Image: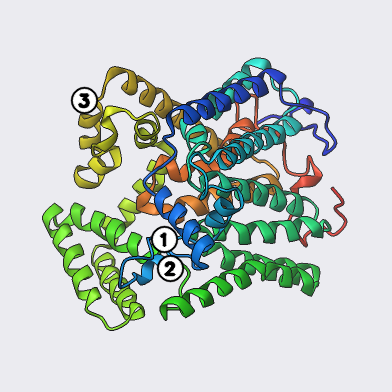
Amino acid sequence: MKYSAADVAYSPLSSARVPVWIWGILLLLHGLFFGWQLGHQSYDFPDSGRYLMAAHNLRTAGVLYAEPLTGLPLSAQEYSIRPPGYPVLLILLGATTTAIPVAVLLLQNLLSLLNVGLALQWIARRRPTLHQWQWGVLLGLAIVPGQFIYANALMSEILLQSCIVGLWLSLTAFFANPQRHWVWVLGAILAALALLFKPVFFPFAGLFLALGGWVGWKQRRLRLFLIGCIPVVVALGWQARNAKQTGYFHFSSIAEINLLRYNVRAVLQKTEGYEAAEQFVATTVAAAESQPTFAAQQHYIRKQSQAVLLRHPVAYAALHGQGMLNLLLDPGRFDLVHFFGLPERNTAGLLGQFAQHGYAAMVAYVQRLPLGLLAILLLVTATNVVRLLLLLRFAACPLPWAWRLPLLGLVLYVALLTGPLGAARFAVPILPLLLAAAGLSLPQRCTGAPGSSSEGALPGLSQANKG
C-alpha cells in the first residue's frame, strides 16, 4: 500500500484539533442523557445495589461488605465481591447520603466526555488531513448508547474506562520515548487503580510486572522494574485484607461466581442441555456450602468447574470466542431497556437466548421486538460491525508499534478476560480505544509507516529516540 506525504506527516506538536461541532454534539448527548436521568432516576442497575451497600457499610461500620450487615451469618463472599475503588468514590461524592447522586453522575459524564475527547484528539494529531465527512463517520462510531447510559448509572464502567484510556496513552507515550519515565509511573498508578475498580484488571498486575521487568532489563534501570511492581503490591495488599476477613487469600469472590454460574453453566447448556446445567450448578453450590471454610468452598467450586471445562475443551473454546465477538457486536438491548424503563426490561435478553439456544434463538427473539427498539438495535449493531472491521484494519496496517501495541493489547486483554460473558456493557471501558483504532483506519490509506515517526520505537530498542 502506498502512502502520501500527508498521510505520514505527523509531529507530536501538531496543532490539529477535533472540530468544534463534534464537541457540541457530544456535549448535547451527554446533557440529554444526564437530564433524562435526573428526571426519571433510573441509575440503579442490577449491580448498583451492592456498590451502594458496600459504600454505606464502609462509611457507617468501617467494613466493605456488599449486603446489609443485619443478616446472620454474614456471607464471606460479600466481603470481596466488589473491590474498594467505586464504593470509596461513592462515599467521597456523597452518594450514600443523598436521594439522587448528582455529583457522581456529573463526574462520570465529564469523564466520559474527556475519554472520548482524548481518543478523538489522539486521532486528530495523527490524521491532520481528515475531511469533515470522515469526522462525521467518527462521530457516528462514537455515539454508542452504552457510553451515555453508563455515564449516568451507578456503575464503575466509566471510571474503569478512564483508567484504561490513561493507561493506553501512558504506554503509548512511553513506547514512543522510553526516556519518559514519568509516564511509566503514571501507567503503573493507573493499572493499580483499574484493578481497584474492576476485578477484570487483577491479572493485568502480573502482565504489568512482566513488562516492567522487560523494560527495566532493556534500559538497565532497576527503578523501572520497581515501578512495574506497583499494581502487584496493591493487589497483594487487597488480597491480604480479604484473607483477614474471610480466611481465603484471594482478590475477589466474583471469579468463582462467574466461573460456575456463567462459564460452566453455558458450556453444559451447550453440550448436555439446560436441565443438566442447572442441576450441576445447584448440586455444586450445595456441596460447596457443606465445606468447613470459605476457602474450602471456593477451592471446591473451582475444582469442579475446571473439571467440566477440561471435559469439554472444544465447546468452551468456541463459547469463549463467541463471547469475545459478542463483546464487540452486542447492541446493548439490556442497557437500553433498563435505562429507559421499557416493557422488555424484565424479559430474558439476547445473551440469555444465546446462552440457552445459540444464535438462531437470538434471531427469533429479535424478530419479536417492538419496531422502534429493533431499529435502534440494528443501527447500533451495524455501527459495531463497522467499528470491528476498522479495528481489524488497524491491526493489519503497517503503523508504528507504539501506536498499535498498547491499543490492541488492552482491547485483546479485556476481550479475553471477559470471555463467554461478552456483552455491550463490558465493551464500554474500551470504546475510546476502538474509536481511536477506527480513526486511524478510515479509508484514506493507513496513516504512518514504520520509521515515519519517532513514535515507532519500543522501549530499550532505541535509546537515541527522543520523540
Which residue is denoted by mark 1 in the rendering? 66
Residue 167 placement, left or right of 282? right
Tell me residue 139's x, y (percent).
58, 24
Q: In the rendered image, is residue 457 in sight?
A: no
Q: Which element type, helix, strand or loop, lies under badge 2?
A: helix
The answer for how far apart the CA atoms under marks 2 and 1 are is 7 Å
Mark 3 residue element: loop
How many neighbours does mark 1 have within 10 angstroms: few (below 14), some (14-19), or many (20 or more)?
A: many
Which numbered circle lies on residue 79?
A: 2
Q: Is residue 142 visible?
A: yes
Residue found farthest to the bottom: 292
State which tag comes first along the sequence, 1 or 3: 1
* Residue 236 screen position, x and y as percent: 56, 74
Callout 2 environment at 10 Å: few (<14), some (14 to 19), or many (20+)?
many
Is 30 left, or right, of 6 in this rendering? left
Mark 1 or mark 3, which is nearer to you?
1
Determine whether 174 is above or below 218 in the image: above
Q: Is 31 situated above or below 414?
A: above
> CB of mark 2 within 8 Å of CB of mark 1?
yes
Labels 2, 3: front one: 2
> What amino acid type should be assigned to the residue bearing mark 2?
Tyr
Q: CA distance from mark 1 to mark 3?
A: 37 Å
At label 1, the amino acid type is Ala
The amino acid beneath tag 3 is Arg
Image quarter for residue 27? top right
Residue at 28 percent across and 59 percent down: it is 261
Specify which label sits upstream in the sequence, 2 or 1: 1
Residue that badge 3 annotates: 368
